[in-house]
Structure formats: structure tokens, C-alpha cells
Image (cartoon, grey):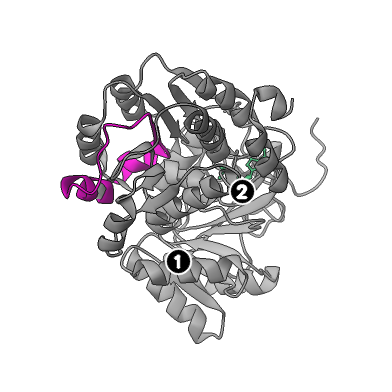
Amino acid sequence: MTFATLGLIEPLLRALETLGYQTPTPVQAQAIPAVLAGRDLMAAAQTGTGKTAGFAVPLLQLLTLEGPKVAANSARALILCPTRELAEQVHASVAEYAQNLPLTTYAVYGGVSINPQMMKLRKGVDILVATPGRLIDLFRQNALKLNQLQTLVLDEADRMLDLGFSEELANIYRMLPKKRQTLLFSATFSDEIRLLAGQMLNDPLTIEVSPRNVAANTVKQWVVPVDKKRKAELFVHLMRKGRWKQVLVFAKTRNGVDALVDKLQGLGINADGIHGDKPQATRQRALDRFKSSDVQILVATDVAARGLDIEDLPLVVNFDLPIVAEDYIHRIGRTGRAGNTGEAISLVCADEVNMLSAIEMLTRQTLARHMEQDFEPEHRVPDTDASGQVVKKPKKPKKPKSSGGGGKRNLGKWVDSGEVAPAEPSIKPVRKVPVFNTGPRKKK
Ligand code: AMP
């Protein structure tokens, strides 16, 4: 299949060729014809699957071929995104796809002055990318009318709900014309998403290009158990040992980000941080410097790092596990994008065992554990598996310490998650089998 066989017009084909897109990704192959046919869409696609082009390319074609010229203070299509960074990124992609078309595009979001945005909207824009809060502000100040709106895209809808935007979405919903096309994209389909879809979508085509809630299988994932107070030390140790060059690190809180960045910088490591408390310009600068490899380690909270597309990012480290299990999928989706392979390492302490268990249940796989020598935790991280079970007490081997492991819990070698079929929860977790991989065994 080619983009031409999907019925795209020549200026779009030329733009895609310039970008080096040769064949449509699965989500594009399904979404493009459906959007061109005017259908509403409910699409579950993993991050990095090419979903942006999946909705933006056919949308650009419809706007080029159909509908009136955009009126003053109006938009013909609206793409809603959960964060400023994502809005910028989606806008950059849309502008690239639109490079040969006579359409205008623009992005608006909070954290920066509203006045230039109001000025820019005066002439109207064909495609407006926006975060929900700023969109409502602009609407309330009469800088934006939505009666010309043909298409609404909800990008990363699950994340918008996680970030507490459900009220804003309900408000926006009331501002929209009844007759419109709506495209909903979400990494995962929760019950809330299905409810939102029920309200917003009209006879949608459902696209699910990957099994539900399964993390990208191009990402090798593993866990290192460690005591909470030694996480930073372990991070530096692993970084030096693995000679990490470019790492995106997730921490739970803004303070956590700042503390780790301070510590790394204090050691002379080239690190920077992004979180919601920092001004937009600072966040963008840190991100740009990370993308251009001027910064080696970027530490971020989930809000700041959502949806970012960083070319060839080899490694994501979860310094803390996310409180919402779905965020794990988004985080590790920053690596292993567009067919590349990636690695995701989680530093997990005993307090986080329930989060680990929730992640394993959601992704339907038991994450391999790798015990790092000299960092074995004093507070043991209880066993978990993809059934959601947390084994509170360590199971004692029948013959304690007689099998040569010196009390060491397995895991000199770990299983690549790519070897574990995610859809098969019954797969055996390696660490539940004592002395599993200490060499060839008599049994069997
Ligand atoms: P997205 O999931 O939209 O964030 O896209 C992930 C990455 O894949 C981006 O860097 C896109 O430029 C790239 N991409 C999207 N579609 C294609 C395609 N058909 N061929 C090659 N790369 C693509």
C-alpha cells in the first residue's frame, strides 16, 4: 500500500515524500480513508505509531478541497491536546504536512501571553491546535468563534481526562456546532473515554491498531529493585556503567525533578529538567537542547513530557513509577518510536510495589527484574505478576541458601520483555522460579 492508493492529493504526497514517509503505518492506512470519507473516528493507537499524520493529512485534504474560506476570528478545524509541548509538536507536524497547501495553521496554549494569540486569530486560521484551558479563554474573550468548525480532533484524549480536563471538554463541547466531524485519539480506551466518545462521536469507526493497553513491544523493559534513598546513586552508577548518552528520566514530582537535576549537575553531569512550574520558554529551551543533544539527561514530570517525539531516543528511565499506570505506557512510548528499538528501565522501591503491579496488569506482562550488585535493597520489593497479585511475604525456598545463590535472588540474566508475548498473561515470570537460570538443570 502507498499513500497514493489512499487517495491523497499531489501536494500532500509531495510533502510526505519530502519527509521520507514511504508507506502508511497501520493507523494511517485505516484512518486516512475513513477521515476522507467524513467518518467520525475512535482510534486507539500507541504513541509513535504515526497517528498525527493519520488524522492531520486527511484533515488537510478535506480543508483544501471542501468548505468556505476561513472567516475572521474563526477556525475550520480544531485539534485539542493535553499539554503545551504536545500542542507545539502537533502543530509542527501539521505545518510540515501542509507545506504545499494554501492553509494557515497556528497553536495556542497557556503559560504565555494571550495578546499575540488574539492578534493572530483576527484573520482566522484553518487549523488551530490548542490546549483546552487557553481555548476556552480565547473563546470567552471573543477572540475565537467556532461556528465555522468542520472538524474537531481530540488528541491523547485519555490524558486530557487524566489531567482533569473533563469539565473543560464539556464546556468546549457546548461551544461546538452540532454538525461536525470528530476524531478521537487515545492511547488507551478506558470506560471514561468510551463515555466521552458516546457523547462526542456520531457512529464512529473504531480503529485499534494494537492490542488494548499493551506497551510498545519494540521497547525492552526491565526493573531494578532499589531502596528509595539510593535511587539517585543507582541512577548515576547505571549511567556511568552503561555509558548512557541521551536519557529521558521521569520523576513523580516537581521537587523530585529539581532534586535530581541539582544532584546530577553537582556531579558535573549535563542535565536539565522540565515540569509544570517552569515558564514555557524555559521548558521549550530545555527540550530543544535535549533534542539537539546539547543536554544529555532530561528529567521531567509526566505533564511536561507527554507525547513528545524525540528522534531515536534510546532510553527512558523511570526514576519513580507513575501513579497512573497508563502513564507508564506513555512514558516508555517516548522510546522505540517509528520502528526503532528502545529500552525502558524502572528504578523501583518497596513503596512502589502496588504501582508496579498495576503496570504489569495493564500491560499484561511481568517485567523482568535485574538486581544491581551492591544496590540490593534492604526493603525488599515483593514479587508481582501480570495477574495483579502482590506476594507480600517472600516465598522461602525449600532448602534455604543451599543452591549456591548465596541468598542472591536470581537475575544475573534477565528476560527481554520482547520475548514475552504481552497478550498471554499466563507466561511464566522468571523470578518466581527459584534458581531458574543458574545453568542447565537436571530436571526435564
Ligand atoms: P506520531 O505517532 O504521530 O507522534 O509519529 C511518530 C514518528 O513517526 C514521527 O517522528 C513521525 O514523523 C514518524 N512517522 C509518522 N508516519 C510515518 C510514516 N508513514 N513513515 C515514516 N515515519 C513516519
Q: Is mark 1 within 8 Å of ligand 1?
A: no
For badge 1, the amino acid type reads Gln
* Quadrant of the rendered image containing residue 419: top right
Report whether 409 appears left or right of 111: right
Residue type, numbered disc 2: Gln
Residue assigned mark 1: 284
The answer to which of 257 and 137 lies nearer the viewer is 137
- The residue stretch that appears in magenta: 134-163
Q: Judge whether residue 148 is colored magenta.
A: yes
- Tell me the element at label 1: helix
- In percent of width and height, residue 289 lies at 55, 71
Dot in front, 2 or 1: 1
Q: Is residue 55 magenta?
A: no
Residue 177 seen in the figure: yes
Q: Position of residue 131 (x, y in %)?
A: 33, 48
Position of residue 105 relative to residue 263, above or below, is above
